[in-house]
Amino acid sequence: FSEIAMLTLEFASAPQLPPHRPRLAEALPRPSSSLAGPSALLAPTALVCFATRRELRSRRRVALTGDAESPQILRQWRYARRSRLMSSLDWTRYHLWVYFVDGCEPSYARARLARFFFEKVCHGRDTSSLLYCAAGGLETTLQENEGVEVASAVPDLHVDDLQNLALPPFTFVPNDFSMYDVIVAVNEETAQRIREQLPADRDELCVLTDFVDAYDVLREMEDEKEVVTPRPLAPGVLTQEGLAQLKPGEPLRGTPPVTSVGSPLCGLPDGWEELWSRTQRSINAMPGETGDDHPFDEAGRMLHSIVGLERALRASIPPDMRWWNDEV
């Protein structure tokens, strides 16, 4: 046990994330199933452990209560799960459809809240024409609990927001994999129920908490290199730079520009700042670990995950993709 524990610590202290933005062809070796836990990432180095057993015995032993307790290993595990999804994305339609699926209660409140968050984030980031979403629920639910407390914990909601949350979800069926590019289960239990309906595991299936730290990872990668986002036109002011951007009636050409990950709450209500900051410390919780968390904390982690999901999908656009109306 001590040898495996020490190997876990060494893996956690080693830099594993790539020093640049992950692309489709640069995904990490993915586990055979997206259910594979953080300890699965130790498999490639297992032979090293047994081959150098004598050296390991001569080193200092460090006791750990579990592999998953290392934040770095958990972070690397999430990155591997995200990379598995990214390798399956198909941008040939120039947009992606995301389907949030809930199976924990008849109201499917978490799927509806995820849909609401995603639409707000995309609107604030001006990616609504690239990323679309819908909410759905399993026909056989896991729990008979309305679960509306999570949505009610979100501050700064208005009438139109409540109407959005009140929209009923669809009913998930396995054939939905042919309609949607990304199937996002709101928790591990829902993901397992979906897998039970499939003949084999699908790369398009992920869990919402896989993206809870995606924004932080992308921001760190961006800080290592300069990413310039074109400034929007200021109303009433026409500069030479702004004149170059004015091309009325001309179709989009070339490749989509690289954009900065920006502020996490860009275009979102000011009241969500506390929702974001108070739950920053809990993003290293194990996926599927719900416990008796306060609805405010759960809603905050969902917001972290949705922001990370939007940033990761936007960053997954292939660098050589060209717009459909490009004549070149």
Image (cartoon, rainbow, N blue to C red):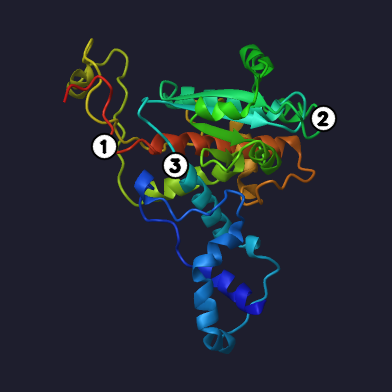
The image shows residue 209, relative to residue 140, as above or below, that is below
Residue 197 sits in which quadrant? top right
Between discs 1 and 3, the one toward the N terminus: 3
Q: Amino acid at mark 2?
A: Asn
- Quadrant placement of the C terminus: top left
Tell me the CA gap for discs 1 and 3.
Answer: 16 Å
Residue 267 relative to residue 196: left or right: left
Number of residues whose C-alpha sits closer than 10 Å to that of mark 1, classed few (under 14), some (14–19) or many (20 or more): few
Whether residue 116 can be seen here: no
The residue indicated by pointer 3 is 86
Q: Position of residue 243 (x, y in %)?
A: 19, 18
State the residue in front, 97 or 298: 97
State the residue in front, 223 or 95: 95
Element at badge 3?
A: helix
In the image, what residue occupies the spot 50% across and 52% down?
80
Residue contact at pointers 1 and 2, CB within 8 angstroms: no
The image shows residue 266, relative to residue 293, as above or below, that is above
Number of residues whose C-alpha sits closer than 10 Å to that of mark 2, classed few (under 14), some (14–19) or many (20 or more): few
In the image, what residue occupies the spot 75% across and 33% down?
104
Which label lies toward us, 2 or 3? 3
Q: Amino acid at mark 3?
A: Met
Residue contact at pointers 2 and 3, CB within 8 angstroms: no
The residue indicated by pointer 2 is 145
Residue 203 relative to residue 221: left or right: right
Tell me the CA gap for discs 1 and 2.
Answer: 47 Å
Element at badge 1?
A: loop
Between discs 2 and 3, the one toward the N terminus: 3
The image shows residue 132, relative to residue 277, as above or below, that is above
Q: Residue furthest right?
A: 144
Whether residue 197 can be seen here: yes
In the image, what residue occupies the spot 39% across and 56% down?
18
